[in-house]
Amino acid sequence: MFHAVKVPAEADEAGFTIIEVLTALAIFALSIVAIGHVMSTNARGVRTLEDHVALAQTTQAVFSAAIPIHEDLAPGRLTGNINDHRWQVDITPFAGRAMNDRGDAAWIPALVRVHVRSPSGAAIELETVRLMRGPKR
């Protein structure tokens, strides 16, 4: 004799359907793509920040080492390279102030323009005023 065993109705609903599995995989794939996008954007941002810091450090080095001291400061142009960063210093008499008409001032202001360009093409240009020796009496 055969006895039929009745299977509970919940057994038909055990497991996942193919639609549920595909939906879960699609959500997982979108999450991975979003995380990858955030990581690549972060890496570009870090690289840009590192380039900016290197440019600022080079500019600081030019200000401290490439600009002559007050006694040796004279109009003209200085150029050079530091860590593949090209720099240029232009020194001109400062025309923004009324100068001594007789030209016998011991010190006169000079406009110092510093331009630094990184290998990536980013640039900084700064201006300052320094004193330089006036004409000899």
Image (cartoon, helix red, strand yellow):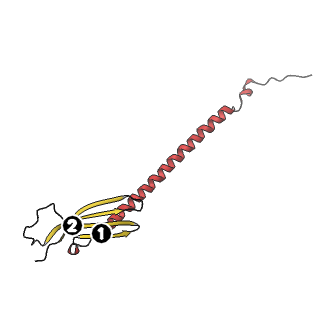
Q: Residues within 10 Å of mark 2 (few under 14, many from 20)?
A: some
The residue shown at (57%, 40%) is 30
Residue 3 in the figure: left or right of residue 38: right
Q: Quadrant of residue 70?
A: bottom left
The residue shown at (42%, 55%) is 48
In the depicted structure, whether residue 48 falls above or below residue 91? above
Of the 4 image quadrants, the one containing the N terminus is top right
Q: Position of residue 89 (x, y in %)?
A: 28, 67
Q: Position of residue 50 (x, y in %)?
A: 42, 58
The residue shown at (80%, 23%) is 6
In the depicted structure, whether residue 88 falls above or below residue 16? below
Question: Closer to the observer: label 2 or label 1?
Answer: 2
Residue 99 in the figure: left or right of residue 90: left
In the depicted structure, whether residue 127 falls above or below residue 72? above
Residue 65 in the figure: left or right of residue 133: right
Which disc is residue 89 wearing? none
Q: CA distance from mark 2 to mark 1?
A: 18 Å
Residue lying at the far front of the rendered structure: 76
Which disc is residue 92 wearing? 2
Q: Residues within 10 Å of mark 1 (few under 14, many from 20)?
A: few
Q: Position of residue 24 (x, y in %)?
A: 62, 36
The type of residue carrying mark 1 is Ser
Q: Which residue is mark 1?
A: 64
Nearest the camera: 87 or 41? 87
Q: Quadrant of residue 120?
A: bottom left
Q: Position of residue 25 (x, y in %)?
A: 63, 38
Q: Quadrant of residue 99?
A: bottom left
Task: Tell me the SS state at disc 1.
Answer: helix
The type of residue carrying mark 2 is Thr
Nearest the camera: 21 or 135? 135
Nearest the camera: 15 or 83? 83
Residue lying at the far left of the rendered structure: 102
